[in-house]
Amino acid sequence: MFALVQLIILFPLLGFIGIGAFGKYLKSEKLIGTIGSATVGISFVISAILFFHIISTGLAKPYIVDVFTWIATGDISVKISYQVDQLSILFSLIVTGVGFLIHVYSIGYMHNDRSFARFFAYLNLFIFMMLNLVLASNFLLTFLGWEGVGLASYLLIGFWYDRKFPGVRITWTGDAANKAFIVNRIGDFGFLIAMFLIFTNFGTLSYTEVQDIAYLGKNIYFDTGLITAITLLLFLGCTGKSAQLPLAVWLPDAMAGPTPVSALIHAATMVTAGIFLIARNSVLFSLAPTTMEVVLIVGVITAFWAATIGITQNDIKKVLAYSTVSQLGFMFAALGAGAFVAGVFHVMTHAFFKGLLFLGAGSVIHGMHEEQNIKKMGNLAKYMPVTYRTFLLASLAIAGVPLFSGFFSKDAILWAVYNDGGFVWWLILTIAAFFTAFYMFRLVYLVFHGKERFDHHKLHPHESPKVMTVPLTVLAFLSVFGGFLGIPYVLGFWFSHHPNALESFLMPIFAKSNNILGIPLEHELHAIEYLFIAIAIAVALLGIKVAISYYSDDRLLHPRRIAERFKAAFQLSLNKYYLDEIYFYLIVDPIVNGSRSFLWKKFDVGVVDGIVNGSATVVQKIAEALRRIQTGIAQNYALLMMAGIAAIIAWVVSSF
């Protein structure tokens, strides 16, 4: 049964090869879209079969499916092999499930695009690489998928390579793709060095073998420089791929790609790869308390930083992009607090509501004929009722309104951060949660309510076709009810004395790390937790109320007055804390200017070209001198021959 995991990987690969090779000969968009969507849909069905098989039969330890030997040289032997366990199958369901809906949605969104087939080929390639990342049984195969999604995201972000995309030192979508690719390479360098250290010290790159060795030697490895270095380097890779500070600058500019790409990258796939990597190596991270603290602090600061930027952005996709960075900060904060299940739970709920928000934004952009400025919208609920209702449900979910999916996962994170990190970090995350509710309903109100601020002569808003609204409806259902899979014990206790369904499912994955961290198997009820739940609810509702009251038509002057009163803070948020400018000033410009003034004009031109050109000049001068010997007069040649013979005789005589 578990051998079916190979088919999960195979079908998106076949879709990529088939559409990539023969897409230009297929004249029907419907056929191309069906092939691209079906390959991912079949992978989802197989993932679901394995998921229910694990639930029905139980799986105490991971099952490894070997395909073939990839590298065998010296002491290194690495196989293309896939690991079937609760974590890998859960992520496979998320990637293929949400990915399938995005593929279907793209059939309508990319209609009449001149590179329709190329787009679906890239989408299939992305899914194939992401599945390799989450299903791999060893670090090296994960790294292959890790780099593969980097390549695929580069192709998708720069898909409309001839379109302009304004940004800091960015002119075209290709510039944004380059930025994403280059920034991610910084984090990938950390991942690569971590693999070197792991193989050198553990003698293997297999996840199960590394974790078994680390767990059996936990008293030896705990809080050592080796484990701290490995985990910090792995986390550096995660900050790049999952857009955490200081490598968060690439993700907002990734909005240059088509909106389905934004949904695919920012919802369920690439940006959650960092969460997956830490969860997969929970034993190593549990042995490194210093790294865990770093993960917690970076997550909290990133969540707050991005949330404060989201409240001032006017591009509908940029608001959601900074929202993604902020929500990823919540996930990392949970992991740093040792709440691995809560972090993974938020990955799942975030995939539902953030995928829906991006697809809803795409529906708005589609209906508004590519307009993305929310100040030029208003009252679109009248023209796009399905998009409005589904977008509203997703906004309620991400805001943390009770019984929506985001409420359960965010509550679990806030409680875990308070328990492990203390009051200060909990307070900062709670403020970030307030800003989340505020900027989401600022977005809802400016886009779907109030006066119509667009030109009716140029724009004629309309609802999107069903091929786009049906995926919205499915994701809306999951955004509303998906959280019931992981109801925190403090709330679920009244219905069942057992852990929530998701925690029970993932328990075999995190049992060893929980043991190291000293997390008890049995839950305890804490009266104070109900207080924190009440505070979280109040914060969410307050954020919504403030946003609606500030952005109603008769009070639109209030935000402007606040911006004028706190001009410095407003400009700081509007300009994203000038992080891009700081990078250019401290890193990019010195490298570029130094390369031009010294490496190019002095070293390359003066030294390298000087050696090459000088060698040619020397040879030329020698050749000119020797050329004079070739006079064409036979007597001169005879004289030279006699001189040579005489020289040889003299040398022979002198040698005796």
Image (tube, grey):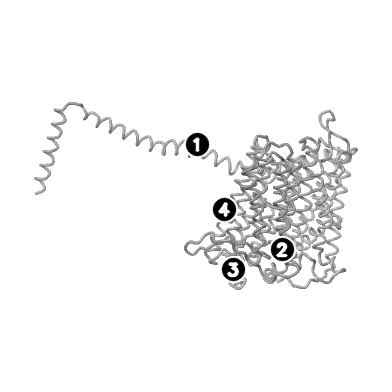
In the displayed structure, does residue 352 sit left or right of residue 151? right
Q: Between marks 1 and 2, how big is the CA–CA gap?
A: 59 Å
Q: Earlier in the sequence, mark 2 or mark 3?
A: 2
Q: Which residue is mark 3?
A: 209
In the displayed structure, does residue 484 sit left or right of residue 272? right
Please provide percent x and percent y for residue 151: 61, 47
Which residue type does callout 3 highlight?
Glu
In front: label 1 or label 2: 2
Front residue of 441/50: it is: 50
Q: Between marks 2 and 4, how big is the CA–CA gap?
A: 34 Å
Please provide percent x and percent y for residue 523: 79, 71
Q: Earlier in the sequence, mark 1 or mark 4?
A: 4
Front residue of 325/301: it is: 325
Quarter-of-image position of residue 44: bottom right
Q: Which residue is mark 1?
A: 597
Q: Which residue is mark 2?
A: 50
The N terminus is located in which quarter? bottom right
SS state under label 1:
helix
Q: Residue at x 66, y 67 (%)?
A: 62
Quarter-of-image position of residue 617: top left
Which residue type does callout 1 highlight?
Ser
Q: Which mark is residue 466?
A: none
Q: Between marks 2 and 3, how big is the CA–CA gap?
A: 23 Å
Q: Which mark is residue 189?
A: 4
Whether residue 151 is visible here, answered yes or no, is yes
Front residue of 438/632: it is: 632
Whether residue 300 is visible here, answered yes or no, is no
